[in-house]
Amino acid sequence: MRQEELFQHFRVLVIRDFLPRTEIHNLLSEIRQSATLPSQVSVTSKGYEDVSIDERKRRSHTVIPPDWCYRSVESLMEKFRLELQQKFDVPLTRFEGPQFLLYGLDDFFELHRDQPTKRANDPQPRRVSISLFLNDGAHNSDSDGFQGGRLILYCPKPEDSRMVTALTFRAAAGTLIAFLSSVPHEVKPVTSGIRITIVGWFH
């Protein structure tokens, strides 16, 4: 399915070469030598958010790179915000993130939504989620940085929202995928190598 058809049918935006190779190289150089922490999961109940480490639901590591990495991505996303707002036809006021993530062997993120409910301390929910791949993977190629680790979106069918279509994405360095934060999605276990991504959310 072509990219424009993908958006028209499922409101999933795929932009190849969103990041130039030089920017990818610079970010990867910092990420690979930066400290990491186990990634957390959040559960919102009755308006309150509980954040914890739960490796039954999510296993990955969040990278803590130098400040310039955050500023670089934040600047890029702010420039992208208006274009995304027009494309999805929803008001987007700010960007949350970025998170720099490493998925190693057997790491995964179970089925979840980025917008389960409105948070008590944030009246503006997440509206659009982004995933930005920094290395190639899951193509069964010798040049891949990893295998497995596919992103799967479960999008409502246009003709019947009670039914869903599973859209599976393999990583290509520099590719950005944007989708509605209400869409359930998951990251399948990595079977070899390290999957490196940036994620974030527009409110």
Image: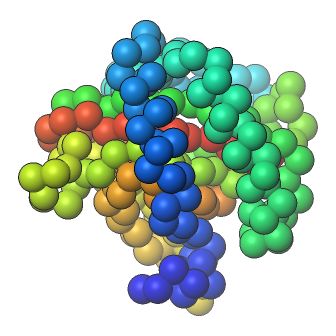
Q: Residue furthest front?
A: 22
Give the tally of numbered discs.
0
| Residue at x-position 79% and y-position 46% | 78
Q: Position of residue 110 (x, y in %)?
A: 39, 41
Residue 165, position in %: x, y? 44, 74
Outermost residue, left side: 142
Residue 99 vertical placement versus 172 (above, below): above
Name the residue nearer the viewer: 63 or 40.
63
Q: Give the vertical position of 9 relative to 200 (above or below).
A: below
Residue drawn where x is 51% and y is 42% of the image: 23
Where residue 198 sits in the image (x, y, percent)?
A: 51, 39
Q: Is residue 182 left or right of residue 197?
A: right
In the figure, is residue 16 to the left or right of 99? left
The answer to whether any part of residue 32 appears in the image is yes
Q: Which is nearer the eye, 183 or 16?
A: 16
Q: Is residue 111 something that shows in the picture? A: no
Question: Which residue sits at x=45%, y=22%?
Answer: 30
Which of the image's four quarters has the N terminus?
Answer: bottom left
- Residue 127: % across, % down: 74, 53
Determine the image quadrant of residue 99.
top right
Instruction: Identify the residue at horizontal 48%, vertical 65% (top origin).
Output: 16
